[in-house]
Image: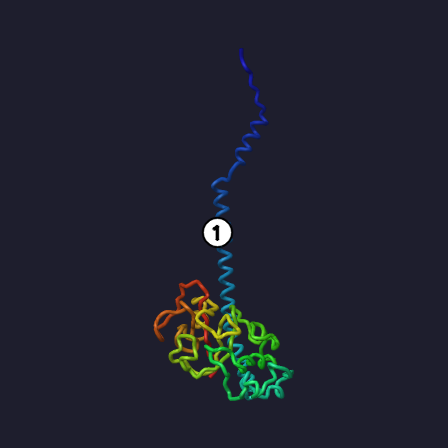
Amino acid sequence: SHIKLEVNEGDIRMSKQTNRQSGFTLVELAVVMIIIGLLIGGVLKGQELITNAQVTSSISQVKGVDAAVSTFRDMYSALPGDMANAGTRLPNCTVAPCLTGAAAGVLGNGTLDSVPSGAQGAESQRFFVHLSMADLVTGVDPQGGQAWGGIYPQAKVGGGLLPSSSTGAAGDFVANAGGARGGLYLTLTTAPAAAPTAATGVVTPNHAFRIDNKIDDGLPASGSVRAFGTNCSTGAAAAATYVEAEPAKVCGLHMRIQG
């Protein structure tokens, strides 16, 4: 006897279609990998563009503070923060911390009462407050206390800026102080209410180098920009260089803006 098998042509076509749809071809996988690569590359490039913009903005911010201080000095013949009679000279300066006097530790002697490596004194705490009351800077809340966005501005690259004065003495700086010049400094650090230390870095060594190179000479231990932080720089004295291969944000900066 014979057994007769009948197969429907539609079933054959469906089976073939099912087999064809059961996996990706090499071409399809290649296209997917290319798309993933482009997306990753785009994200990394985007992050680098953001970092470049932050570095550029931070440099502009420092230069803006420098210009604001010059304007303040021209207008009032005084250093912001060090103006002992601010209550009678600055607009809306009617309450602390803007309203100051010798009793508050504001002496009017032409310098600020803290050094770059030290905690902020009464005058340094009023530095940006006076500039804000004179309508020369933004991003400061005179009643906001010792915080970024309070009496100190947040830096575009992270952390914030603390003002101070130095005679150029080595002890005035956290590190890399040899041959430093006296003057008015801004310190880029993470801690608004504490003295800068080797552990209060804000940027990577590469980003610190970029800022230093734009403002000064690109060297962490010479010129007007002095770097500090664990593994931020290597080498002795003026021969020191930034450890640009270090990916962590270990660098803070002391930046001299005026004599």
Residue topped by disc 1? 37
User: Who's the residue at 59% across and 85% down the image?
Assistant: 100
- For residue 173, which quarter of the picture? bottom left
Q: How is the image coloured?
A: rainbow
Counting from the top left corner in percent of width and height, residue 222 is at: 39, 76
Q: Is residue 184 above or below residue 13?
A: below
Depth check: 129 or 107 in front? Answer: 107
- Local packing at callout 1 (Cα closer than 10 Å; few below 14, some 14-19, many 20+) is few
Counting from the top left corner in percent of width and height, residue 93 is at: 63, 83
Q: Is residue 89 above or below residue 118?
A: below
- Asked whether the viewer can see residue 119, the reply is yes
Depth check: 57 or 149 in front? Answer: 149
Q: Is residue 218 left or right of residue 64?
A: left
Counting from the top left corner in percent of width and height, residue 37 is at: 48, 51
In the displayed image of the protein, which residue is found farthest to the top?
Answer: 1
Counting from the top left corner in percent of width and height, residue 105 is at: 54, 85
- For residue 154, which quarter of the picture? bottom right
User: Who's the residue at 50% across and 61% down the image?
Assistant: 47
- Asked whether the viewer can see residue 134, the reply is no
Q: Is residue 259 above or below residue 225?
A: below
- For residue 144, which quarter of the picture? bottom right
User: Who's the residue at 55% across and 79% down the image?
Assistant: 125
Depth check: 64 or 104 in front? Answer: 104
Residue type at numbered disc 1: Gly
Question: In what element is the residue under mark 1?
Answer: helix
